Structure formats: C-alpha cells, structure tokens
Amino acid sequence: MDFIAASTIRAVFLLLIVFSYDIACQWFVNLFKRMDEHWPEHLKVPPTTQLIPTIPKLHEPMHKRANHEMFSLNFIPGVGKSDLETPERVWSAHNGLGNSTKTQGPGGRHDVLDDHFGFWNWLKYIGLGKTLMSKYKAAIAERNIQVEGHRGLTESLDPALVAQWERLCMEWEGDGFPKTKPNPYHTEESSA
C-alpha cells in the first residue's frame, strides 16, 4: 500500500489528499516514520501536502473501536455526503466476467476485460453531466436546510458555550494526523 500511495502522490501536486481505505486506522499508524526511513526520496510526500486518512462509511461500523471519529467522513470538513465506497460498489456489475472469461486464453481474456471496463467507463463518462448536476442541485437545497437548522439551534444555546464548542471543533479539525488535540466528537463508552 505504501508504494501505491507514494506513486500516486508523486504524480499529483495537491495540498490536501484524503485517503479512503478500509484499514486506514492501521495503515496510517507510523506512516510518516515509514516514509522517512524507507521511502526513496523521489516518492516522499511534500511537507506542504496534508494527508487525511478515512474509513469508507460501509466499513466504519465494522471497526467498533472507540476514538475512530478521526477517520469518520462525518467529521471531515469538505467531504459532504461522500461515502468513498465507489471501488466496492462496482464489483457486482463485473462478477459475470469471471464465468465468461475463465476458459479463455490470456490474450482473449485481457481483450474482453479491457472492452468491458472501457464500456463501463464510457457509460460513466456520458452520464457525468446529468448525474453531477442533479447531485449539485440536491446539495444546494440540503445545505440551505442544514444552515437554517444550525442557525436556529445555535441561537437557542448559550453563546459562550457555542463559542467554546466551536473553538474545540476548529482546533481538532485543524490538527493534522496523527491528531493530538482532544476529540470533541468522542463520548466515553460510545463510538460514532
């Protein structure tokens, strides 16, 4: 996983990279130490790039570990309603290929798989505009509802307490990984 991540990061220049990995909580432990000690210099992540590990939403409940909120997409600013499960979602559409290609030789099998995935990608590409526009419109409407609900709730609370909560949340969200600030989303003996 380290080599795949490093090779991908090397190809792009981004200030923020969100990793969606079902065992991000294990993989990210000592990542920076492994980077410093074992990664070749040309694959190391630039110091200006912030890395955020996340566990996709379908996989997260299976972890059942306290203090996993730092890996939850629900608490990462900017990801919205993303579930980051797209790689898992497409497997069912490709299951039939196994029976179709198991008796083929390597060249024929490769051609059939290449054609299938090319067609799959083409279908996604031509539907992108319609899909993204409908999601954008729904997101704007939902954002307006949430902003109004948040404003109403905030006005009903003690302003000093709201300011304290906002400060705690901003400090925690601004803390890089591994997080060292107290987690405002963690409740004892429960998990997200």
Image (cartoon, rainbow, N blue to C red):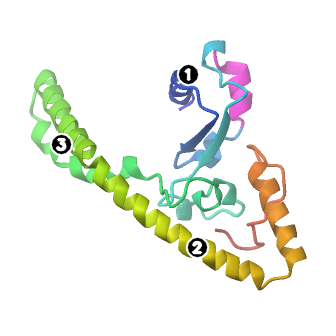
Q: Specify start and end residues of the magenta stretch as a single range.
A: 30-40
Image-quadrant location for residue 169? bottom right
Q: Identity of the amino acid at label 2?
A: Gln
Image-quadrant location for residue 118? top left
Instruction: Find the distance from the CA under tag 2 to the CA under tag 3.
Output: 45 Å
Instruction: Find the distance from the CA under tag 1 to the CA under tag 2.
Output: 38 Å
**Which residue of the protein is positioned furthest toward the bottom in this rendering?**
156
**Which residue of the protein is positioned furthest toward the right in this rendering?**
160
Q: Residue at x 78, y 47 (%)?
A: 175
Q: Earlier in the sequence, mark 2 or mark 3?
A: 3
Q: Is disc 1 in contact with disc 2, using a CB cutoff of under 8 Å?
A: no
Q: Which mark is residue 10?
A: 1
Question: Of circles 1 and 3, which is in front?
Answer: 1
Instruction: Find the distance from the CA under tag 1 to the CA under tag 3.
Output: 33 Å
Q: Earlier in the sequence, mark 1 or mark 3?
A: 1
Q: How many marks?
A: 3
Give the labeled residue for mark 2. 146
Q: Residues within 10 Å of mark 2 (few under 14, many from 20)?
A: few
Q: Which mark is residue 98?
A: 3
**Does residue 78 appear in the picture of this structure?**
yes
Question: Of circles 1 and 2, which is in front?
Answer: 2
